[in-house]
Amino acid sequence: MFRPAGCTAVRQAFGSGAAAKIGQGSQSEGRTRTVALQQTVEKTVAQTVSGLGYDLVEIERSAGGLLRVTIDLPWAGPVAEGVEEAFVTVEDCEKVTRQLQYTLEVEGVDYQRLEVSSPGIDRPLRHDRDFERFVGEVIDIVLKAPMGQAAAGQVSANRKKFRGTLERVEAADGSHGWQIVWSDEPTPAKPGQKISKKRAPATLQALGFTLDELREARLAPIVDFKGRKPKSGAATPQ
């Protein structure tokens, strides 16, 4: 699926100074306050974004007081053939930015700069509906723990990172799971060297997983200059 470069709205702001107080007293008190502040930020942002009719994709707090919020349009299922999928616009980002500025000030959240943007080509996948939405796409996943004995000699036991095509797997009891399918194609010994066409194609491999086993999952940042390609076997939301 082709996703546009996206939009970003940035605003300077000065909060109540709550963050400047963190760190006074014991280290444990400082950690407790930091966690409480982070929970307040996440709750406030999530409620504001959803209240305006958008999905919250990600919240990041960076050095220098930057608060970065990524939003997306709610997914209503696969689009009909010939219908263009809607994406977040600059106006959407501006709308969320204005409301967040007001709400964060009321809640006393300290930040120096607010940035609201649409997802990039490496959009994170966090919820079950995200995986439903991007069935058939190439994704990157990082497991919380190495493969270990489950590798069964097929891949390195220490391997945690994988890239493959996301597939939905239906179970006999009606439930569903997820897997990625990939093949470890041989790489040329030298840059520009071609792989012989007589070489047998690499064997397809599959890795099933649950969302609890993932440390991170994102769309693979692959740019397709040929434009949008139709999906085969797109998932239907339950």
Image (spheres, rainbow, N blue to C red):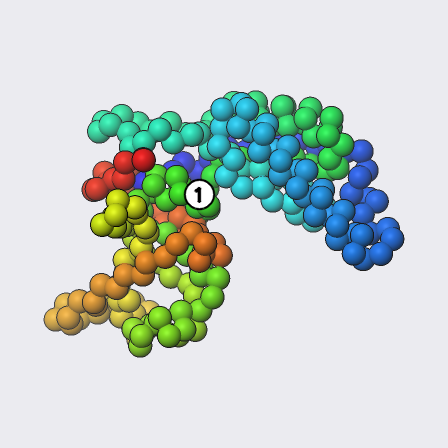
Report the residue at 80% width, 52% height from top.
29
Q: Nearer the viewer, residue 79 or 170?
A: 170
Residue that extends furthest to the left in the rendered view of this protein: 198
The percent position of residue 89, horizontal first and vertical second, equals: 47, 27
Q: Nearer the viewer, residue 18 or 208?
A: 208
Residue 4 versus residue 161 in the image, above or below:
above
Residue that extends furthest to the right in the rendered view of this protein: 25
Q: Can residue 82 be seen by looking at this rendering?
A: yes
Query: Hey, which quadrant is residue 132 in on the image?
Result: top left
Quadrant containing the C terminus in the rendered view: top left
The residue to which callout 1 is attached is 127
The percent position of residue 178, horizontal first and vertical second, equals: 32, 51
Query: Hey, which quadrant is residue 26 in on the image?
Result: bottom right
Task: Please tell me whether mark 1 sits on a helix, a strand or a loop.
Answer: loop
The percent position of residue 231, horizontal first and vertical second, equals: 24, 40
Q: Left or right: where does residue 122 sit relative to residue 225?
A: right
Report the residue at 58% width, 29% height from top.
47
Q: Residues within 10 Å of mark 1 (few under 14, many from 20)?
A: few
Residue 89 versus residue 57 in the image, above or below:
above
Q: Left or right: where does residue 131 sit relative to residue 113?
A: left
Report the residue at 81% width, 38% height from top.
17
The percent position of residue 153, horizontal first and vertical second, equals: 31, 77
Quadrant containing the N terminus in the rendered view: top left
Q: Left or right: where does residue 67 sit relative to residue 7?
A: right
Report the residue at 44% width, 43% height from top.
127
Amino acid at circle 1:
His
Residue 92 versus residue 149 in the image, above or below:
above
